[in-house]
Amino acid sequence: MSQDKLLALLVDDDDDVLSILDTTLKRIGFDTILANDGEEGWNLFCDRHPKLVISDVSMPNKDGLQLLTDIKSLNHETIVILISGYLEESISIGSATDRPDAVLMKPFRFKLLKETIEKLFPEVSS
C-alpha cells in the first residue's frame, strides 16, 4: 500500500458488486482489499486495519451487522458503510457504537457512493 492512499476493505458475496466497489474506490483514491464474506472480511480487517469498510448486510459465515459490531468493538473510529436491499431503518437501530457511519440502499449510484465517502473522508474530495 502506498503511504499517501487510504485503505478500504470491501466485503460482499456478489463478485459483480465487489468489482464495481473496487473500481469506484480506486478511482476515488483508495487502495482496496476484497473479501467474499464477513468472516474473511473480519480476518482481513484484523490483519490490515483499513480506515474504511464497505460491507453488504446479508452474507454467509458472518453477516454485515455482526461484522460491523466486531469492527466497532475493536476500533470505533473505523468508518463502516453498509450496503443493503433492506430498509435503512432496520439497519440503523441499535446502540450508537454499533451503528454504521452510512447506509446505502441497493441499487445505489456511483455518484451517491462517491459523495458519501467524500463526506466521511474530506481528504479524498476532488
Image (cartoon, rainbow, N blue to C red):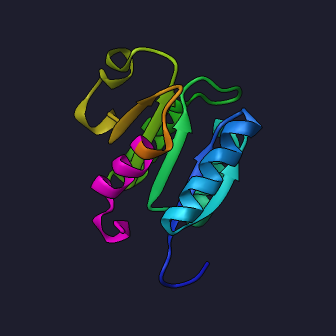
Residue 124 percent across, percent down from the top left = 38, 68
Residue at 71% in and 33% down:
13
Residue 123 percent across, percent down from the top left = 32, 71
| Residue extending farthest right | 15
Image check: 13 left or right of 32? right
Image check: 17 left or right of 80? right
Magenta includes 90?
Answer: no
Give the main secondary structure of the magenta stretch.
helix
Q: Nearer the viewer, residue 112 or 52?
A: 112
Magenta includes 114?
Answer: yes
Residue 37 percent across, percent down from the top left = 69, 37
Residue at 65% in and 45% down:
20
Up/down of 30 relative to 107, above or below? below
Up/down of 2 relative to 41, above or below? below
Residue 23 percent across, percent down from the top left = 64, 56
Numbered circles on residues, count? 0
| Residue extending farthest left | 96
Quadrant showing the C terminus = bottom left
Residue at 54% in and 39% down:
55
| Residue extending farthest bottom | 3
Up/down of 60 relative to 34, above or below? above
Image check: 72 left or right of 22? left
Quadrant showing the N terminus = bottom right
Residue at 39% in and 22% down:
91
**Numbered range of the magenta stretch:** 112-126
